[in-house]
Structures are given as C-alpha cells and as structure tokens.
Amino acid sequence: MHGHHGHGAVAFGHKHHHGAAGQGVHPAAKRIVLVGNPNTGKSVFFNALTGIYVDVSNFPGTTVDVAQGRWGDDLVVDTPGIYGVASFNDEERVARDIILQADLVVNIVDAVHLERDLFLTQQLIDMGLPMVVALNMMDEAEAQGLKIDVRLLEESLGVPVVPTAAVLGRGMAELKAAIPHARPGRVDPTIMAKLKEWYGASRPSPELLLAAEGDAEVAARAGVAPMGAREELYIHRRQRVNDLIARVVVDTRDGGGLAERLGRWMVQPITGIPILAGVLVALYYLIGFLVAQQVVGFTEKSFMKGVYEPFIKGLIEQIIDPSTPLATVLVGEFGLLTMTITYLFGLLLPLVIGFYLALAVMEDSGYLPRLATLVDRALTGLGLNGRAIVPMILGLGCVTMATMTTRILGSQRERRIAVALLGLTIPCSAQLAVITAMLASLGPGFAAAYAAIIVTILVVVGTLLNQILPGKSTGLLIDLPPLRIPRVGNVVRKTISKVQMFLSDAGPLFAVGSVLLSVLQISGWLEGIQTLLAPLTVGWLQLPKEAATAFVMGFVRRDYGAAGLLSMDLTSMQTLVALVTVTLFVPCIASVMMLFKERGWKEAVVVWVGCLVVAFGLGGLISQILI
Amino acid sequence: MQMVRSCSRLTVDGPRRDPPRGGTTMTLDMVRRGDRVRILHIDDPQVRFQAIRFGIGEGADVRCAEKLPAGPIVLRRGRQEIAIGRNIARSIRVEAI
C-alpha cells in the first residue's frame, strides 16, 4: 500500500552510470536533480520542465514522495524540500541519495528568504556539483521592498543565477536556457583546504564533504572515515552566507504587510484559536454538511442505490441464479458490485475529495506550520510537539497514511504515543463521513457530546502515556513560511493524487472485505459471531444484536463498522454509544498492517488489544450511564 | 533556577557588574515579545545544527516576534521566522542587545 511513498532512491539504484542501464536513455542524457528548501515553489519548476504531476507539500517534512520525469533526453528528478544535505530525517536521506547521483543540480531558492535558502545553496556548491540557481519569487521580493544584486550574487556563487517568478511563468524560458550552462561554483576555500588535509582531496567531492560533515553512512560508502566537523563547517558556511547576503541584498522595508500580521494572528492563541475555530467550522460545513449530506445524498442515495444498484442487480440476476452463493457475493447484501461500489464511489469518494481539498488548501497556504505552533503547548502535555498535528490531521483523512507519517516525529517515544492515539481516538475520513452524517441527524448536542468524549479520551490517554513511557520527547523547531494564497493548480493536483492513492489503497481492501462478509453470511458464521458477541453488544453496550456485525466489519475496514450502523434502527443514545465504541474500536486492516510494519509486532499487539479493551470498556460504561 | 545558572555564567566582562540593558544574559524562554537578543549557546546538538541552517545559530542576532503563553517563541531574523518550543527555549542562552 502506498507503494509510491517508498524511498524513491531505491528505484534509482546506486550507480552513477545510468546510461548503462540501457532503458532507452540517450547516452548523453543527464540526471537533473531539483533541490530546494520547503516552500520554494520547486514543484512548479518540475511541472514546467516535465509536464508531469508532482505532489507538493507546503508543510516542512511531510513529503517523501519523489517524482521524476523527462525533459528532452534528460531525466528530471524532484527531491523533498530540505534545509540542508545530511541525514537528520527521512526526507534528507532521500534527498541526499538522489543528490549524490546527480549530474546537474537546479537549486531553487526563495528570494525573500535568502538567509535560510543560501545555506543549502552553498553546501551544494561545496559538493562541487554543476549547478544553476533559480532565484524564485522575485516578484514577491520586489513587492516587499527587497533589492537583490543578481549579478553580484551570480559572481559570488560562481554559478548561473536566473531570477524567476515561477507561478507567473516568468523566467522559465531563461532558466531552461541556462541549464546547459550549469557549472560548479566557488567552493569555500577553507572547506576545500580541510578536505585536502583530511582526505587528500584535490577536487571537491559530494561524498567527501558529507563524510567530513560527519555522515557515517556516506563515509562508509566512500570508504573513508567520517569526521566530526559538522559544526565547524556549518558555522563557517553560515558566516560565508551571511557575508554574501550583506553584500547582495538591500532590505528597504522591514515587512509588516497584511500577510505577516495575519500569520501572527494565526499563532497567537487569542486570535489563533478563533481562527482555528473558524477553520473547523468551515471544514465542518464543507465536509459534514455540504459533502456528507448534499453531495452524498445525491451520489449514494439517488444515484447508486436508486439507479445503479437495481440496474446491476437486474443484470447479474439475469445471468446468475440469485439463490447461488456467487450471486450473493456479487450483488447480495455485502455484494462486490453493490455494497463495495456504492460505499466506495457513492459515499467515500465525495468525502475523501472534500477532505483532501481542504487539507491541500491548508498546506499550500502555509497555515499548517502556524497551526503546529499554536497547538504546540497543548500537545506538549501529551508527550508530543506541535508537529504531531500533521499526523493527527492526516489521521482524519486516513489513519494508515497518518501512521506512516509519524516518522516525521523526532523520537521513538513520540511515534509510539502518536500511533497509539491515532489507532484509538482519531476517526479516519471514511469513518468520519458516516459519523458526521449520523451526528448531523441527531443534532448539535449529540455532536458536542461525541466530540467531548473523544477529545477527553485523547487527552487522558496521551497524558497517561506521557507519564508512563520512559525518555524525553523532542521540542518544536519549525520554519514558518510566508502565508501565500493557495495556488488552484497545486491544490487540485494534490487532491487528485491523494484521492487516487486512497482509491488504489482502499479499493482492493474493500473488495476483500466484502467477499469475506459474504462468505461469513453464506456459511452462517456471521450469525454465529453475532450470537457470540451478543452478551457484549446487547448486555453491556445495550445495542441491537446486529451491531456485532458492524464491529466485525470494523475489523475489515474501519468505516464499514460505522457505515454498518447507519442502516440500523437506533435511538439517539444508542447511536452515540455505538459511534464512540466504533471510533475507539480497532483500526482498519490496512492501518493495522501499517501498525505492525512501523512499530513491530509487540507494540502493535499492545496497541490493538488496548484499543479493543478501551473501546468496549468505555463504550459500555457510557451506555450504562446514559441508557 | 534557570536564571541563576545562566546569569552566573557568561558575564563576559569582569565579575559582578550590574547588568545593564544590553548584555544581560538569560534563557530564551525569558525574552519578551519585541526583545532583541543574541543567541549565545544552544545545548542540544541537533537543535544547534538546525538553528545554523535556519540562520539563528550561536552568535545570530534575532528578535522575538511572538511569544505564546507557556508555548513556543517565534524568532525573527530578516524575513525568516522560526517557532521554537518552550522546552527547547529553556536550553538556549541569549544575551539582550
């Protein structure tokens, strides 16, 4: 699942001699690697060169996707946004390995943030790689009163520098024209002298530089000893960059624009919490009301159940005897062609689109890192830092994806806490869809009660884990990119790619789940399990016997659990109990698989069993109190 | 306690000089919004490396652009804004400028 999320570098092999692979690549073809800090508009360059979609993430540290495409005969490879080449996290390791195989680097820098971006630029230059710099967002720099001496910058770096405004399409032709003129820049003489002293290097080398900066992995590959000189070299490079900026940049104004003020309001609790509340209300309106009720009302009820299902049922039953098991599997209650298709396309697809659209806007605008800053204090109490808001929000989309994203967290301890909270308390978009639809019919009082119960459990469990688990969690250290109006193209493309990912991930699991349920139904086991669970569902949770089916389905796919409840005749209180139980209940099979993969079987079993115990324990407790 | 520790060290010029406005050393969590400070020392090596990349490493002059109650501190240098969690801020020594 999420196969393309894997480290792209693996697919590229480790040899420099790509021509030898003989896959129709022109012998003179070059490997052009795009490198830049997060939020520099790198994806726009990739698209302009290759015309192929790339997933763009505005939030530092969430994309490990690597895209590649062709520009003429040359191969263009994108890298995750990074602040420097090292191995501090997954993104950096992925980017580092791609950069080490580059024939030529196009370094995209944000003209408004040269202090930050030129550190990476100088590091790439110190590697001795042939390079072109795209000085992007020049329009914005000018609008903000920054004057940049491009010619002096070019001369000082020693590589071609092309001013661009990629979103407006400005400078792209010039950049394309400059790429063939890429050349190694001016390596810092002190650093070059060190490489010579330590390794006897006569020319700059990417591997030796990284080895000197203490990267043991690269050093081992190059067969040299790593040096502990990272700090010394970093400080030296930083000084060089600062001196350079002092010469080439004149700041005629010190910010203070509307975007900057709005950015401040987003992080300061007094204004940030109302803004967050506004965002959540907008999200609820978009997903909970507009999509879950209006759109789904049409796609699921009117179209899928009203038109599609009778049609396909009639068609199949003409060919296959309706009383045969095969007919049940295909068009029965849990039919592959009926329930699976209806749920997947009628119910989930519109919701998933709505959800990812909203997330893409939040990412692309720069709101997400500010949200991380705002919630940092609250998450610190749970043993997490503000960055954990990313997996938490992604968890509202897909817990499987979120579980994978916990890798961005700084320590094993944080990952452990985040994974447990995701499995237990965060309803995924598929589940959330059904939950919001059901809550919407109950009214705001019940919705508030449901939210209060889930949030309380999240806080209590997180606080407990933070107290119990040994070790220390890492703190927040995050770049706040400038607020920008989200680009429609980016948002749409990102949404499409995420939705495709969801369908290819969820589709097969849905099908397997449906067949499994049909088999259980035909064999009579479903009733058996229901009877077996009856004391629990009827006695303890005080729900109808059929609710057991919903829970069994929850194993197959989390949202089946919630969706199964939708068709049941429940009182308001029963609905609340059922929704709480099914939310806390075990994650879907895909996320359980991811749980085992990421955390190992021991921890995964603990989380799994823990979810079951808490779900039924608390669900029953609430039921006993309320009903 | 933090303050005592940080004040007793690093008063560069001579013993027991009454701290004037500039040159007062403290930990970063003690700065107020609008204060300008110079980063003197960062304990955690990982934080130190990342701070150098962001341009707010040891020796950098920064301004506290925002301070959330019991929460992160937003530092600004040029156009660059970095949010730093309160726990990390406690381990960063700064000097008022």
Image (cartoon, coloured by chain):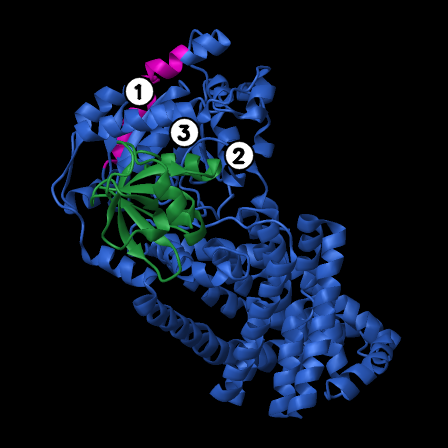
Chain colours: A blue, B green
> Residue A13 at what x, y percent from top left?
60, 27
Asked whether residue A73 is in view, the answer is no
Question: Which range is magenta?
Answer: A171-193
Q: In the rendering, which numbered label is found on residue A72?
A: 3
**Circle 1 residue:** A181
Q: Position of residue A139 (x, y in %)?
A: 19, 43
Q: Is residue A420 above or below residue A85?
A: below
Circle 1: residue type: His
Q: Nearer the viewer, mark 3 or mark 2?
A: 2
- The residue that label 2 is drawn on is A93
Whether tag 3 and tag 2 are in contact, CB under 8 A, the answer is no
Can residue A178 be seen at all in this image of the molecule?
Answer: yes
Q: Earlier in the sequence, mark 1 or mark 3?
A: 3
Q: Earlier in the sequence, mark 1 or mark 2?
A: 2
Identity of the amino acid at label 3? Gly
Task: Work out how far the residue at label 1 is from the one at label 2, CA to CA, in angstroms.
Answer: 28 Å
At x 58%, y 67%, the residue is: A426
Chain bearing mark 1: A
Alpha carbon distance from label 3 to label 2 = 28 Å
In the visual, does A542 lie left or right of A311? right
* Above or below: residue A1 compared with residue B16: below
Task: Give whichever of discs 3 and 2 has the lower sequence position.
Answer: 3
Asked if residue A183 is among those painted magenta in the image, a careful observer would answer: yes
Which corner quadrant of the image does residue B43 belong to? Answer: top left
Q: Are marks 1 and 3 in contact (CB under 8 Å)?
A: no
Q: What is the spatial separation of the Cα atoms under label 1 and label 3, in whole angstroms?
A: 16 Å
| Quarter of the rendering occupied by the C terminus of chain A | bottom right
- Judged from the image, the secondary structure of the residue bearing numbered disc 3 is loop
